[in-house]
Image: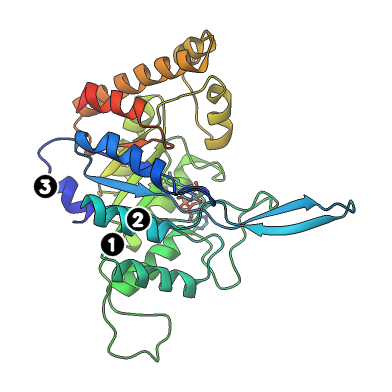
Amino acid sequence: MKVIDIIQQAPKTVFSFELLPPLKGQMADKLYRTIDELIEFNPKYINITTHRDEVEFRELPNGMMEKKTVRKRPGTVAIAAAIQHSYKIPVIPHVVCGGFTKEETENMLLDLNFLGIKNVLALRGDGLKSQSTFVPEPDGHSHANELVKQIVNLKRGEYLDPEIKNTAALDFCIGVAGYPEKHFEASNLDIDLLHLKAKVDAGADYIVTQMFFDNQKYYDFVDRCRAIGITVPIIPGIKPLALINQVTVLPKLFSIDIPEAFAKEVRKCKSNDDAREVGTAWAIEQSRDLIAHNVPCLHIYTYGLSDNTRQIAKAVM
Ligand code: FAD
């Protein structure tokens, strides 16, 4: 089933969560355990992130540096299909522009179609750590709106190679990312919103937001989206804070604010267990308020942790 149909047909707020593919060298059993622990709360779909190749410099025994390209979490397509087939709930793999040519993206989308996957989240991805700005592949996309256009073309049976005749149309529901507190590269929220609108105008069916810890930021964002004619559902993304240091790390990594009242409580914590309790309680309050405002879905960034996500689901769903 497609995400857009799930949320439009649901009589009340539904629940979804996001997982990372296993690190290279590890099996998927931990991932399955996380899903097993959350499945009783009836999640309507599960997102699986995608991780591009990274470039690392490693010191050799002779003191020279070796440049190595590594993908630390491969396997999104396979793990997405395996989960969807085992648990019989829709899985939404993330498709990123960074590190991929248009041809590779087309082939990935074909694989997803063969595997029965009908949903994708279309993203640009971040630049490499060694690059100051995002650099697309020579034949890749620069922005997510271009990726959305490519997926929409495939929905019409238009492949990259015009020589391919009698093509089958690939049927995907497309989600895109939105940033209530602005994407870190955008010079202001107005321009960021226009870029978001371009993704929706290109054919995105819904938006899922970056994490936020102050619901007012999400409500204001939704109002501003509606004011410029973005009418698709906007799904809030919730991250339960789980470590003391996340009070400084998350704002830096995701360009978001942590309200002082919450940050103060986290700073008082003596251990990460205490911080996780405070973080879960905050996420429960956020979730209750969002549900009271009839949001279509609560999307929880689990980062592979099921216990706090279970507590939230138990408290609010
Ligand atoms: P875009 O929509 O392309 O926007 C990026 C920046 O460019 C913004 O500042 C925007 O204002 C600007 N911009 C957009 N379009 C244009 C245009 N046409 N011309 C000029 N400027 C433009 N990353 C991963 O690597 N893997 C994941 O699995 C992943 N999952 C995510 C899930 C969610 C829900 C979210 C919110 C983010 C996720 N990310 C993931 C991170 C995401 O890839 C980064 O935030 C990335 O920097 C931006 O991606 P985007 O799709 O929003 O890009």
Note whether residue 282 is visible: yes
Q: Which residue is mark 2?
A: 80
Q: Which residue is mark 3?
A: 9
Instruction: Name the amino acid type tagged 1.
Output: Ile
Instruction: Name the amino acid type tagged 3.
Output: Gln
Q: Position of residue 180 (x, y in %)?
A: 41, 36
Question: Going 25% across and 28% down the picture, which residue do you hit?
Answer: 313
Instruction: Name the amino acid type tagged 2.
Output: Ala
Whichever of labels 1 and 2 marks the residue nearer the N terminus, that label is 2
Q: Position of residue 48 (x, y in %)?
A: 38, 50
Circle 2 residues within 10 Å: few <14, some 14–19, many ≥20: many
Pointers 1 and 2 in contact (CB under 8 A)? yes
Q: Is residue 283 above or below residue 13?
A: above
Q: Nearer the viewer, residue 174 or 78?
A: 78
Q: Which residue is mark 1?
A: 117
- Helix, strand or loop for disc 2: helix
Circle 3 residues within 10 Å: few <14, some 14–19, many ≥20: few
Pointers 3 and 1 in contact (CB under 8 A)? no
